[in-house]
Image (tube, helix red, strand yellow):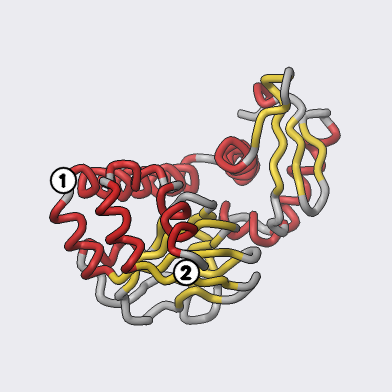
Amino acid sequence: MTENANIWYLDNFSMMKVLKPQELMDLEKMTVMADVAKNQTVYFPQDEAKTIYFLKKGKVKISKVSDTGKEMILSILGPGEIFGELVLAGENSRDDLAMATEDVVICKVNQERFKELMAKNPDLNFAITKFIGLRIKKIQTRLENLIFKTSEQRITWFIKDFTTEFGRQITGFPNQWHVDMKLTHKEIGKMTATSRQMVTTVLRDLETKGIIKYDRNRIYILDMTMIK
């Protein structure tokens, strides 16, 4: 991959817009590009934390795995997001699992080198701090949903949240949305602390009511206002 391509990749991350051209070139020199195939792991729990990851293409799931092997998916990340960012707050080893849910392209940056860049650029420091804060807020929202919402409400909330984050509006129909899901009902269950059977039941009910259409790869929301 050429240097210019690396810079183009990095420049397409919104928080990198605060970098001056020379700083962007410096960051490019720190960056290692990598392809990760679907279902391959980026890092495991207990791996040494030395790297920040910028996701250029595809989706990555971040999850927690219990000692008995039970998995809870914390988030699904898409292009333009970073992960492994807690290394900037002093994390020495990973406490979560990062896995590609489809073929992905990532930029890897050594955390010490990135900290040096943050120290030189207060705007970048602020952008990263704000990003971490927003991610923590999103996780808090999910925890609140787990506590206060029913299984059905958690699943419909997830469908709405996932679609607005990764999907797009249908031109000319502001309440209609389309999203490439590429998540199994079991994975949605892990995101919402529900069973695969409950996810199937809720999706079928929404389809019967004419609110969505779906298959194993995509969802069409026919009326976003009807999803509460």
**Residue appearing at x 65%, y 64% in the figure:** 102
Q: 10 Å neighbourhood of mark 1: few (<14), some, or many (≥20)?
A: few
Residue 118 drawn above or below residue 156? below
Q: Amino acid at mark 1?
A: Pro
Residue 200 point in image, percent of width and height: 77, 51
**Residue appearing at x 53%, y 40% in the figure:** 149
Residue 45 point in image, percent of width and height: 41, 77
Q: Earlier in the sequence, mark 2 or mark 1?
A: 2
**Left or right, residue 134 beside residue 64:** left
Q: Quadrant of residue 99?
A: bottom right
Q: Nearer the viewer, residue 124 or 38?
A: 124
Residues under numbered marks 2 and 1 in contact, where contact means CB atoms less than 8 Å apart: no
The answer to whether any part of residue 213 appears in the image is: yes
**Left or right, residue 55 beside residue 19:** right
Query: Which residue is under mark 1?
Result: 122
Judged from the image, the secondary structure of the residue bearing numbered disc 2 is strand
The nearer-to-camera label among 2 and 1 is 2
Quarter of the C terminus within the rendering:
top right
Mark number for residue 33? Answer: 2
Residue 99 drawn above or below residue 117? below
Q: 10 Å neighbourhood of mark 2: few (<14), some, or many (≥20)?
A: some
